[in-house]
C-alpha cells in the first residue's frame, strides 16, 4: 500500500483547476448503457472508482475508449447482464447499474453491495422503488437477481433523499411506461448533471435539484456528448488546505452556487472569498475562528463529504466546534487519527466536540476512508514535523494525484 510522507509547515499558495466530479461521473457512466450508441463525456477525472466503472462497462460488452480526460463509451452491443462480483465489492456505488440495466435489457444480476468504511450503506430505498416500478428482485446467496419485462412509471416517495436511490429511479424511469414522479428526491448538484446528460440524449426529465423530479418515459435515447460538472468536494478540500496552512488559493473551474454551503463555513472561520468568472480566490485568516456548529445534511445543507476535512481545520481553531454527522452512522474514523497528532476531539455517537489546539504534531496515521484520509493529509500539511499517511489507496478513489497537486501549491509531500 502506498503512503504519503508530509513535511508540515508550508503555506498552501497558488492556483489549481478543479476537474470533473467523481459523484457525477459514476452515475453518468452507468447511464451510458441506455442509448445503445455513442456517449462522449469530457473532463473525466483519473480516479480508481472511475476505472472500476470502465471495467464494469467493458465486462457488459461496451467499448470504452479514454482519450486523456475524455471517455467515449459505445454501448451498442451488450453481451452480458451480470455486474462482476469483485467489482461491486470494490465499489458499492456500482449498484447504480440496477436501474440502467433494467431499462436497457430488462435484467441484471449484481452481488449485494456490502457496507463500507463509513456505514452499513443499505439499499432498501433503491430496491423498494424499483419494485414499485415493476421490477422483480430476488435476493439470494448475496446476489440480487432483477428482472422487469416493462417498467412502469409511478409516484415514489423516498423516506430519505438518497442520492443513489434518486439516481437509480431516474435511470429506471427513462424508458418506463408513463410518468415517474420522485418526491423527497435528493437535490445534490450531481443529480442535476445526470438530468442534463439524460435530456441531452433525448430523455424527458424535469425538476432535478429540487425535491420533486418528474421523468416521462420515452422510446429510446440517442448519441450524446456531455461535460461533467466540477467536483465541489475536491474544491472544498483544496480550500481547506489553504485555510489550515494560513495560505491563499485560486480555484479555476468552479460553480459558486454548488459551493455555497462549504464557502459559508469558511467565511465563518474568517476567510476572505472573492469570485470572478468560473473561479474563486480564498485568503485564509491569520487565526482560524472556531465555527460554532457543523451539521451535515442533504444538499443544500453542509455536505457530509466535507465533514472530515472541516474537522481537521477546526482542530487548529481558536475555540470549540460541535459537529453533528446526520448522514452516515460511522463517519468519524479520522478523529482517532487526528487525536494521535494532538487534536482535542470528543466523540459521542453522531456528535463530535472539537476544541482547537495551538498546534498539531506529525505522526504516522492510517487513512480508513476516502474523505477521512484527505483530512489526515490536510492535518499533515499544518502539523509540526513529518506526518506519514498510510493506505493512500482510499484517497486515490476521489483525488487525482493529491500529492502532485498539493506540491504544486507549495506542500512538501513524497509518495512512496
Ligand atoms: C452518495 O452516496 C455519494 N456517493 C457519497 O459520497 C455521499 O456521501 C452521499 O451520496 C451523500 O451525499 C456517490 O455519489 C457515488 P445516500 P449514496 O444514498 O448515494 C441511507 C464520497 O465520499 N440510505 O444519499 O450511497 C444511507 O445509509 C461518497 O464521495 C438508506 O438508508 O448516499 C445514508 O445514511 C461517500 N437506504 C444516507 O441514506 C438506501 O436505500 C445517505 O445515503 C440508501 C441510502
Image (tube, grey):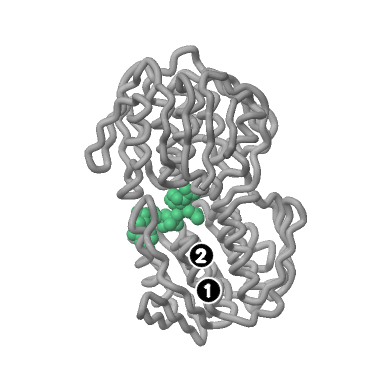
Answer few, some or many: residues within 10 Å of disc 2's Cα (few below 14, many 20 plus, some between 14 and 19). many
Cα–Cα gap, marks 1 and 2: 8 Å
Taking depth in this image into account, of 355 and 28 the one nearest to the observer is 355
Secondary structure type for disc 2? helix
Query: In the rendered view, would you say 356 is above or below 238?
Result: above
Answer few, some or many: residues within 10 Å of disc 1's Cα (few below 14, many 20 plus, some between 14 and 19). many
Measured as percent of width and height from the top left, residue 358 is found at: 37, 15
Measured as percent of width and height from the top left, residue 216 is found at: 56, 71
| Disc 1 + disc 2, Cβ < 8 Å | yes
Determine the image quadrant of residue 242: top right
Q: Which residue is mark 2?
A: 94
Taking depth in this image into account, of 142 and 326 the one nearest to the observer is 142
Number of residue marks = 2
Outermost residue toward the top?
Answer: 286
Q: Which quarter holds ligand 1?
A: bottom left
Outermost residue toward the right?
Answer: 67
Q: Which mark is residue 83?
A: 1
Give left or right: position of 141 versus 237: left
Q: Which mark is residue 5?
A: none
Check mark 1 vs ligand 1: CB closer than 8 Å? yes or no.
Answer: no
Residue at 69 percent across and 49 percent down: it is 43
Residue at 36 percent across and 79 percent down: it is 141
Residue at 53 percent across and 24 percent down: it is 7
Outermost residue toward the left?
Answer: 348
Measured as percent of width and height from the top left, residue 112 is found at: 40, 70
* Observer able to see residue 158: no
Give left or right: position of 120 versus 89: left
Check mark 2 vs ligand 1: CB closer than 8 Å? yes or no.
Answer: no
Measured as percent of width and height from the top left, residue 298 is found at: 41, 47
Amino acid at each position: 500500500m502506498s503512503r504519503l510522507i508530509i513535511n508540515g509547515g508550508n503555506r498552501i499558495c497558488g492556483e489549481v483547476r478543479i476537474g470533473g466530479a467523481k459523484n457525477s461521473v459514476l452515475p453518468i457512466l452507468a447511464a451510458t448503457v441506455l442509448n445503445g450508441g455513442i456517449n462522449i463525456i469530457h473532463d473525466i477525472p483519473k480516479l480508481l472508482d472511475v476505472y472500476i466503472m470502465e471495467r464494469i462497462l467493458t465486462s457488459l460488452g461496451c467499448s470504452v475508449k479514454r482519450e486523456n480526460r475524455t471517455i467515449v463509451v459505445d454501448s451498442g452491443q451488450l453481451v452480458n447482464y451480470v455486474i462482476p462480483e469483485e467489482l461491486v465489492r470494490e465499489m458499492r456505488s456500482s449498484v447504480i447499474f440496477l436501474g440502467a440495466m433494467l431499462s436497457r435489457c430488462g435484467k441484471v444480476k449484481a452481488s449485494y453491495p456490502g457496507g463500507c468504511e463509513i456505514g452499513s450503506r443499505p439499499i432498501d430505498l433503491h430496491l423498494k422503488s424499483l419494485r414499485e416500478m415493476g421490477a422483480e428482485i430476488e435476493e439470494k446467496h448475496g446476489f440480487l437477481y432483477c428482472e422487469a419485462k416493462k417498467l412502469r412509471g409511478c409516484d415514489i416517495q423516498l423516506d430519505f433523499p438518497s442520492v443513489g436511490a434518486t439516481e437509480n429511479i431516474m435511470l429506471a424511469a427513462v424508458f418506463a411506461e408513463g410518468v415517474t414522479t420522485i418526491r423527497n428526491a435528493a437535490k445534490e448538484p450531481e443529480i442535476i448533471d445526470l438530468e442534463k446528460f439524460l435530456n441531452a440524449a433525448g430523455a424527458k426529465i424535469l425538476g432535478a435539484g429540487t425535491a420533486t423530479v418528474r421523468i416521462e418515459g420515452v422510446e429510446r435515447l440517442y448519441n450524446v456528448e456531455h461535460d461533467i460538472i466540477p467536483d465541489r468536494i475536491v474544491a472544498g478540500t483544496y480550500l481547506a488546505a489553504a485555510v489550515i496552512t494560513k495560505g491563499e488559493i485560486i480555484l479555476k473551474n468552479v460553480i459558486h452556487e454548488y459551493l455555497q454551503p462549504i464557502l459559508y463555513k469558511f467565511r465563518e472561520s474568517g476567510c476572505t472569498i472573492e469570485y470572478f468568472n468560473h473561479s474563486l480566490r480564498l485568503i485564509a485568516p491569520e487565526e482560524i475562528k472556531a465555527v460554532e456548529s457543523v451539521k451535515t445534511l442533504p444538499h443544500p445543507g453542509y455536505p457530509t463529504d466535507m465533514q472530515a476535512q472541516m474537522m481537521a481545520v477546526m482542530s487548529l481553531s481558536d475555540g470549540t466546534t460541535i459537529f453533528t454527522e446526520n448522514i452516515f452512522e460511522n463517519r468519524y474514523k479520522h478523529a482517532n487519527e487526528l487525536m494521535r497528532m494532538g487534536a482535542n476531539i470528543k466523540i459521542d455517537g453522531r456528535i463530535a466536540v472539537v476544541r482547537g489546539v495551538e498546534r498539531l504534531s506529525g505522526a504516522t496515521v492510517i487513512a480508513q476512508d476516502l474523505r477521512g484520509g484527505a483530512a489526515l493529509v490536510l492535518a499533515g500539511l499544518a502539523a509540526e514535523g513529518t506526518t506519514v499517511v498510510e493506505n493512500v489507496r482510499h484517497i486515490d478513489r476521489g483525488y487525482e494525484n493529491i500529492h502532485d497537486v498539493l506540491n504544486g501549491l507549495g506542500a512538501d509531500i513524497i509518495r512512496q
